Amino acid sequence: MTEDELLREVQKLAKLNSWLFTHFRSVKTPTGYRTPLQGDPGFPDCVLAKQGYKTLHVELKTERGTASPAQLDWLVALDGVIIRPSTLEWLANKLKEEK
């Protein structure tokens, strides 16, 4: 499963369980992919939120993908999680229990 396919699955799970969802899409530039945001690099791929419940900060990775040091810094600071295809079931259960 690619990260784009994983992103679509996470978005579906969020909507199915009435969570708000956002993702900042990177754009390709002559020097590589960039996300037009100001601030420290490495912010998680997705933010999921639901009134009265914890906000979830999610970094998406393929089964073999690795998080950069900057991504890990943000995940630690935000108590975020890495979601891979093999952990989608965990996320589905997490979003359901907070329903």
Image (tube, rainbow, N blue to C red):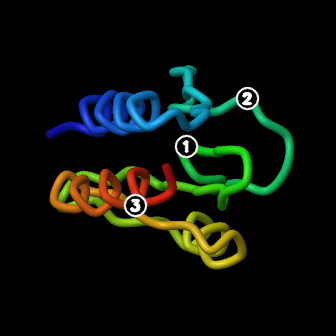
Q: Which residue is mark 3?
A: 94
Marks 2/1 in contact by CB < 8 Å: the verdict is: no
The percent coordinates of residue 88 (x first, y second) are: 25, 53
Which residue type carries mark 3?
Lys
For residue 75, side relative to residue 13 (left or right): right
Marks 1/3 in contact by CB < 8 Å: the verdict is: no
Q: How far is disc 3 from disc 2 in space, using C-alphas?
A: 30 Å
Relative height, residue 93 to residue 15 (above, below): below
Looking at the picture, tell me which residue is in the foreground, 31 or 78. 78
Marks 3/2 in contact by CB < 8 Å: the verdict is: no
For the point 47% across and 55% down, the residue is 59
Counting residues from the start of the chain, the first of labels 2 and 1 encountered is: 2
For residue 46, the mark is: 1
Q: How far is disc 2 from disc 1 in space, using C-alphas?
A: 15 Å
Counting residues from the start of the chain, the first of labels 1 and 3 encountered is: 1
Relative height, residue 81 to residue 38 (above, below): below
